[in-house]
Amino acid sequence: MITEQQLKQIAPNCKIGKELVVVLNQLLPKYNIDTPLRLAHFFSQYAHETMGFTKFVENTNYTSPDRLMAVFSKYFPSKIIAATYAGKPQAIANRVYANRFGNGCEQSGDGFKYRGRGFCHLTFKANYYQFTLETGVEAIRHPELLEEPFYAVMSGCWYWNKRKINALADANDSVAVTRAINGGTNGLVDRQKLLSICQFVFGG
C-alpha cells in the first residue's frame, strides 16, 4: 500500500495526495506495479513528467520566441515565425503536433486537443484512440478526462504496461525506462535524482 506520507516525501508540493493515494492503491496492483523497484521507477518518472504530481496537462504557452526556437527548433526555424506564435498555446500545440500519429493538419485543432495529459502526458490522437479502445474510457471525445486524478493515473499505468516498462524497471535501467517514457533522455538527471529518493522511500 502506498501511503500519503510516502507520496509527500517524493512530491512535497502535491496538493491532492490523499485522493491520489486512494487511486494509486486501486490501480497499481492491476498492472503489477507492485515491487519496490517498479514503484521507485514508476514514481520517479511520473513525478518528473507531472512536476511532482501537480500538472496533469501539458503547458504549451511559450511566451518567448527565443524559447520556442530552443524547444521546437524544427517547427520554429526563424524568429519571425516564432514571434507569430509566441503566447498562443493553442496555435503552438496545433503546429508542433500536426500531421503525426493520427493528428490532422494544423488547422484541425488536433494538436491542442490531444496534447499531453495524464501521468504519462499521453499525446496524439492515435494514442488517445488506443487508450480508449483498450480501457473503454472515452478519451477521444473527452480528452480532458485524463486531467482528472483517476484517469491521469490510469493513463500512466496503461502506458507503462503497454510499453512493458516493468521489465526495464526490474533491470533497474533508468536510461531505458526514461527512453520508454520520453522517447529520449530529456530530464534524465532529474529523473535519476527522483529515482534515488523513491528507492529510499520504497526500499528498492
Image (tube, rainbow, N blue to C red):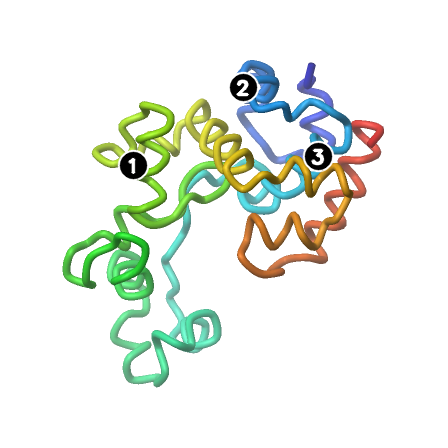
Q: Which residue is mark 2?
A: 27
Tell me the kind of residue under disc 1. Pro
In what element is the residue under mark 2?
helix
Find the residue positioned furthest to the left.
Answer: 107
Q: Quadrant of the C terminus?
A: top right
Task: Say which label, 2 or 3, has the lower sequence index.
Answer: 3
Q: Which mark is drawn over residue 38?
A: none
* Residue on which disc 1 sits: 143
Instruction: Check disc 1 and report its element: helix, strand or loop.
Output: helix
- Taking 176 as reference, is 97 left or right? left
Give the residue type at disc 3: Ile
Q: Earlier in the sequence, mark 1 or mark 3?
A: 3
Q: Nearer the viewer, residue 169 or 67?
A: 169
Q: Which residue is mark 3?
A: 10
How far across and how far down the image is residue 201, in percent? Answer: 80, 29
Q: Amino acid at mark 2?
A: Leu
